[in-house]
Amino acid sequence: MSHPESLTIPDPVRPGLSLSRAIFRFPDHHVLPGFWLSFGVTMGWVSSLVLLPLLALFAKASSAGVEQMLHAVLAPRALAALELSFGVAALAALINLPLGLLLAWVLVRIPFPGRSLADAIVDLPFALPTAVAGITLATLYGPSGWIGAPLASLGIQIAFTRLGIVLALIFIGLPFVVRSVAPVLADFPAEQEEAATTLGASPWQSFRRVILPALLPALISGFGLAFARGIGEYGSVIFISSNIPMVSEIAPTLIVSELQEFHYASASCIGLFMLAGSALSLVLVATLQRRWAAPTSRKRRLIAGGQT
């Protein structure tokens, strides 16, 4: 009985190649010419524009010492500004969840004239300068604005209040939720909805038990991005908020005030605390996404298997 020479199992590690080099080696074929040059330019760009400013912020805050860092962050004015920034950012992100889901559903599932234009308008907060957005919102919702004047006659004031800050953050953060949910909704298999309908599920049950679990990771991602953006938003908020310390002053405004008074260490400490809060929120979002993704994928496979 002859053994064909072609039936050989290739060794994943080439002869003469150590295990460490086999693990950390780069691919042999590269799309771009000059791999090491491209790699060096990329890492240099990331280091100079992302890592170095963060390291400089950390170094400046650390130079103040632990006692001064705590004094800067735990000061009553700083605590009030941080509490307001994190609170309104979380509230606006929560409001954006149903709004973004509804808008994504309409853009993906419901054909209507001008849908392409509406889809492009969703990205307007990405391209619009934040200062222009703030001026526009202040003009609309101010005491003499198109929307603010009728509301003022009813005793409702939006501009120069905390409600105005929430409104500005909703405007800024809504596209993050829509753009996180819309691709997942567009790629959702129609067979799974048909299977749920075949099993006797109502449209609401099909949405709640089949579609919504698949959208949860995208919703969590959109919430995290909108929340992280809202924490540090400055341009659109400064025009619609009264910026009164201990009342409606947000943390970015406090940082600018500290810089104008040449309190660079205090400004760096507050900025470092905001950076830590944003990073922690993104880590929590990634953890929740992984936790929700596995059961959702298993449930979708079970539904697909039950259909067959």
Image: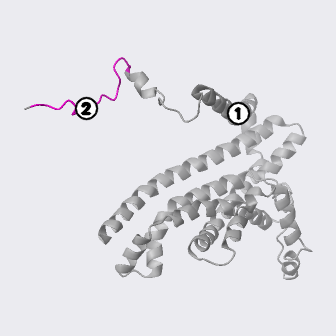
Q: How many marks?
A: 2
Q: Secondary structure at mark 1?
A: helix
- Find residue 113 and report its horizontal and vertical position in percent: 67, 78
Q: Which residues are magenta?
A: 2-18
Q: Which residue is label 1 attached to? A: 58
Q: Nearer the viewer, residue 7 or 138?
A: 7
The reply, left or right, for residue 248 in relation to residue 122 is: right
Can residue 3 be seen?
yes
The reply, left or right, for residue 127 in relation to residue 38 is: right
- Find residue 46 and report its horizontal and vertical position in percent: 66, 34
Tell me which numbered mark, 1 or 2, is placed earlier along the sequence.
2
Picture quarter containing residue 157? Answer: bottom right
Magenta residues, dominant SS class: loop
The reply, left or right, for residue 34 in relation to residue 287 is: right
- Find residue 105 and report its horizontal and vertical position in percent: 58, 72
Q: Mark 2, residues whose alpha carbon is within 10 Å: few (<14), some, or many (≥20)?
A: few
Q: Compared to 62, does 162 lie above or below?
A: below
Q: Nearer the viewer, residue 161 or 46?
A: 46
The answer to whether residue 168 is magenta is no
Quadrant including the N terminus: top left
Q: Secondary structure at mark 2?
A: loop
Q: Compared to 16, does 203 lie above or below?
A: below
Can residue 160 be seen?
no
Which residue type does callout 2 highlight? Ile
Q: Mark 1, residues whose alpha carbon is within 10 Å: few (<14), some, or many (≥20)?
A: some
Q: Which residue is label 2 attached to? A: 9
Which residue type does callout 1 highlight? Phe
The reply, left or right, for residue 55 in relation to residue 221 is: right
